[in-house]
Image (tube, rainbow, N blue to C red):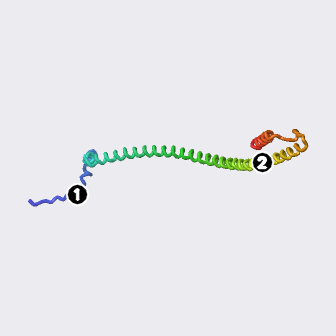
């Protein structure tokens, strides 16, 4: 017998399958793909967990925590220093106001001292004048006494009404000096 050649037209297999089979095959492909994705994610998760639990990572986390603690400490210290500085600035402001007040008071005292010094100078000049006047008056009184004695001996009588005693003159001068000082 002779070989017979059968020629089959290629027919896609999917076309011959029933729709239920096609859904089942599609579902199987999806399941395998989903399984591969899950395995890949699981491998990545395991790799990440191993890396996260490594000594270098733990050291890095410890260093980060230490830096955060140190930063928090520095912030707290900075806040304390700023509060202290504000207190110092307030005290400096009060001191500056006190200095201004004391300077103004000192200037007023200086001015008053100068006025008092001028008054003392004027009073001293007045005292010198009064002393000179007292001395002149005493000299004049002494001269008048001598003249009076000389004329009284010659006339034989003394008039006590015209003579002023030195005590009265001294009292009058002291009273006038007291009036000038007041």
Coordinates of residue 109 in the picture (x, y in percent)? 66, 47
Judging from the image, what secondary structure is the residue with disc 2 in?
helix
- Select label 2 or label 1 by which is in front: 2
Q: Is residue 143 left or right of residue 74?
A: right
Residue toward you, 145 or 66: 145
* Depicted 172 relative to depicted 132: above or below: above
**Which residue sits furthest right?**
155
Q: Which residue occupies the foreground of this view, 118 or 152?
A: 152
52 or 119: nearer the eye? 119
Q: Residue at x 11, y 60 (%)?
A: 3
Q: Is residue 166 left or right of residue 1?
A: right
Image quarter hosting the N terminus: bottom left
* Percent x, y of residue 154: 89, 44
Query: How many numbered callouts?
Result: 2
Tell me the residue that label 1 is attached to: 10
Give the crowd class for mark 2: few <14, some 14-19, many >=20 residues within 10 Å: few
Q: Residue at x 22, y 57 (%)?
A: 10
Whether residue 32 can be seen here: no
At horizontal 84% and vertical 44% (from top left) the residue drawn is: 145
Is 19 on the left-hand or right-hand side of 129?
left
Coordinates of residue 130 in the picture (x, y in percent): 77, 47
Quarter holding the C terminus is: top right
Q: Which residue is mark 2?
A: 135
* Element carrying mark 1: loop
């Amino acid at each position: 017998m002779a070989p017979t050649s059968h020629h089959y037209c290629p027919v896609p297999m999917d076309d011959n399958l029933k729709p239920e089979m096609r859904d089942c095959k599609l579902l199987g492909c999806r399941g395998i793909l989903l399984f591969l994705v899950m395995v890949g994610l699981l491998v990545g998760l395991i790799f990440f967990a191993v890396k996260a639990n490594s000594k270098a990572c733990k050291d890095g986390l410890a260093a980060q925590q230490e830096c955060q603690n140190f930063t928090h400490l520095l912030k707290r210290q900075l806040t304390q220093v700023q509060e202290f500085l504000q207190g110092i600035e307030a005290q400096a402001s009060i001191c500056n106001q006190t200095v201004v007040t004391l300077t103004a008071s000192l200037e007023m005292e200086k001015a008053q001292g100068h006025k008092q010094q001028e008054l003392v100078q004027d009073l001293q000049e007045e005292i010198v004048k009064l002393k000179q006047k007292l001395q002149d008056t005493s000299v004049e009184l002494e001269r008048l006494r001598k003249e009076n004695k000389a004329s009284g001996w010659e006339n034989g009588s003394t008039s006590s009404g015209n003579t002023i005693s030195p005590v009265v003159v001294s009292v009058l001068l002291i009273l006038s000096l007291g009036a000038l000082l007041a």
